[in-house]
Amino acid sequence: MKKIFLVIFLFFTTFNCAQNSDDKILTVAFWNLENLFDTIDDPNKNDNEFLPESTKQWNEERLERKFYNLSRVIRSMNGGNGPDILGICEVEHKYLLDSLIAKHLFDKNYLAESPDAPDERGIQTGIIFNSNKFKLIDVYKDTVKLDQNISTRLILGVKLVSNNNDTFHVFINHWPSRRAGENESEIRRIKAANTLRQRVDDIFQNNPYAKIIIMGDFNDEPTNNSILNTLKAKPIICDSAEMLNEIKIDQDQGELFNLAYKAYSEGEGSYKYQDDWNMLDQIIVSKELITGEKIKYQCNSFQVFKPEFMITKSGKFQGTPFPTYGGNRYLGGYSDHFPVMAKFIME
């Protein structure tokens, strides 16, 4: 009998320790979902490419397959527990995120937010978060003003409060593309960076120790002007205690640090264009999340998340994300971007 009680005691002790350990880790991720559209024509959007009668023949069966594929990747993040906060882009509207959660992630206590955007194609940014850990307090919707009355995606900002009463400002981005050429289109991404930096500065003005998480598909890399010089997101390789100490004693609290820089400097990327890997998807945080006492970045936890089942196994595109479409040819995959992910330790 004593042995039985001992086994039960050890089981619950181990289980509780595991639960407590999980509670102290905050997992944040971002993913470009690659055109998550419904199948219904919206006369106010240029969504003709993703309709049943279009060349892509986008129908309910393919949408359901897309939902399943996306949920499979999301579930596999964070050791099979899913992320606590997931920023996304390329979704047509909030109802699609609600449907994804209701059909395939119903056990995760997720809630979603995705305000309507002025983008002519109707694709939006959005966020999914664990409602057991966070409460949504406020939503910011910042419009990037481009020349010639061109509309682009909103910069979505949310204020979340954790169960520990920590406030997080989270910003989800999908900056203008390089379609017109990297150099020719750079000014548009600089304007997006400037719009975001103004919002960040307003937050720092009220609280120099604000916990800020910025993530997105920036269509630029960590050393491009928009990220490095306009947004002022500094490179960081935090495997040096000396470097972290230097950051800690620096008097400037209004700093941002790019967690993607180390992986980028080692040649990794989240998206492959022709023969080059590009680190377009990044996670950037305020100084308080690097050197703070209550919560801080787990050094080197940033990763390009590449579950084996999502990787193209052969052919010209071997090693890249397995997408939903190759041009207009339906492939039935996941996305043309890999997600990115980072972890934070909560004291």
Image (tube, rainbow, N blue to C red):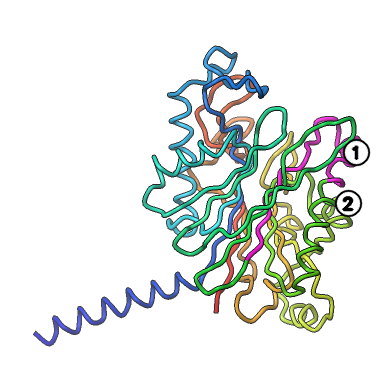
The secondary element bearing badge 2 is classed as helix
Q: Residue at x 59, y 36 (%)?
A: 91
Point out which mark residue 183 bears. 1
* Residue neighbourhood size for the residue with mark 2, other residues' Cα within 10 Å, grouped as few (<14), some (14–19), many (≥20): some
* Residue neighbourhood size for the residue with mark 1, other residues' Cα within 10 Å, grouped as few (<14), some (14–19), many (≥20): few
Is residue 173 one of those drawn in magenta? yes
**What amino acid is at disc 1?**
Asn
The secondary element bearing badge 1 is classed as helix
Location of residue 229 by image quarter: bottom right
- Segment colored magenta: 168-191
Q: Residue at x 68, y 28 (%)?
A: 121
**What amino acid is at disc 2?**
Asn
Task: Residue under label 2, please give it.
Answer: 225
| Residue 95 horizontal side relative to residue 283, left or right | left
Q: Residue at x 69, y 64 (%)?
A: 212
CA separation, marks 2 and 1? 11 Å
- Give percent across and percent down for residue 153: 72, 39
